[in-house]
Amino acid sequence: MRDHSGVLDSEVRRGAALASVVLAGLGLFAAWTVLIPGVSHWDNAVAALIESLRLTGPVAAAFAAWAGARRRRTGAAPSLRAPLSVLGFAAGAFTVTTGVLAVKTVLGGGGGGPAAGGLLVALAGLGAHVAVGWAAGWAVPRALTPPLVGLACYGLVAWAAGRQAWWSLLAPLTHEREEVRDVFERFLPDLFLDQAVWLAGFAAVVLLGWLAAAARRPMLIAPMLLAALAASFGLSRVHLEYGTARPAPVAYSCREWPITVCVHPGMRPGLPELGEEFTAVAARLSRTPMVFTRVEQRPGDERSALPRGTVAIRVDDLAPGFAARAAADFVRRIAPCSDDYSGIVTSWLAGRPLPGGLSAGQRHAAAWFGSLAEPVRRDWLRRHYLTFTQCRLKPSHFSGFRQNLALPVSPPSAAPPALGWRSSEDAGGWGDTPVYAQVTAAGHRE
């Protein structure tokens, strides 16, 4: 076998080409599983790219360990060009993954802008894996070294990912969507540059230290100390900034009529469906203490006060049925009841079918409530709102209530555009008469 001053031999090159294909495929698979369905935003793409290193990083480390062990066994002279060549192949696969995610984001009309710091973190994290793998393979050129290196890297990153501490960000992680995927969840771009400096410095220390020991070059100690200084600087910055860094404020994308619905810009395609769903909920809650004219998507753990007439909703993704799930979750928060009498009302509010397993008395109450015209149901809810939200509804509340209303209610001749017609089919089986309604300036539906 020929050795050209650090250039990889033909077998290692063939292995590198195969590893690049595997890394690109794994990177795309891992990133796609992390992407929030339906969300087209650069933050989403960058977070998915970083998270994909949980798979691609250990595989790259295992391949680098194999290449380093093979080079050691063949007696080739140690050279920095060899591990950098391995890193070049891994970076090529990383570029493919990045390009596919970028195209998807652009075609989806992605909001925000690409976080260059996040790309640097991912690339530096890949370099750190390759450096560790190469040094381990050279130091212990055995057949079991590559798989053990890969498993060790995977285990360390997986362990760090389960910790909410500053030192866990010394691995290429974002602390995003560990259990619940949330487009607002702890995306800290201010820390990206600090993470990248630490990871790149660490990789440089490992490679320069390996070369200084393997080639017996004491003069490499000086640049290795400089790399260690850079790594220490990045580490200290991560430590200092972790507690104070905050996600950048979100500039909402909104739909202003008939009610205002505002979501994270990456979820802008979901505005029409959310608007339709929550317009119906707003109409049913008109003239109650929960009347609202504005809906805002908020992070799941946020508890800040909202202006009067504004409600918060949780939308995790734009998978099919997302708007109905958001409406049902919102209604459950109004009346977190477990009894089926309250379930009759919450099903109507959310526009969903009745719950199953009703008793004879509950079926009678549901049939009575379903026989009411839509305006009468709203008036019933206004009168029994406190009882409903306190989960104290009884069979006696579902009888004897009537109101003399003419149906259908026709729109005035000079009214703003209407919310639309909702029949029994539209409303999940509630009622049998289409009712025309509109939102007034006060936010009521009449």
Image: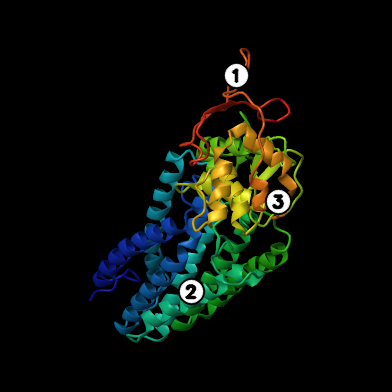
Tell me the element at label 1: loop
Tell me the element at label 3: helix
Q: Residue 138: where, in percent of width, then height?
A: 40, 82
- Mark 2 or mark 3: name the one nearer the start of the chain: 2
- Mark 1 or mark 3: name the one nearer the start of the chain: 3
Count of numbered badges drawn on the protein = 3
Residue topped by disc 2: 207
Residue topped by disc 1: 411
Rendered position, 142 above or below 329? below
Left or right position of 181 against 92: right
Q: Residue 432: where, in percent of width, then height?
A: 50, 33
Toward the viewer: 296 or 251? Answer: 296
Q: Residue 96: where, in percent of width, then height?
A: 37, 53
Residue name at image x 73 percent, y 40 percent: 383
Rendered position, 250 above or below 223? above
- Classify the position of the C terminus by image quarter: top right
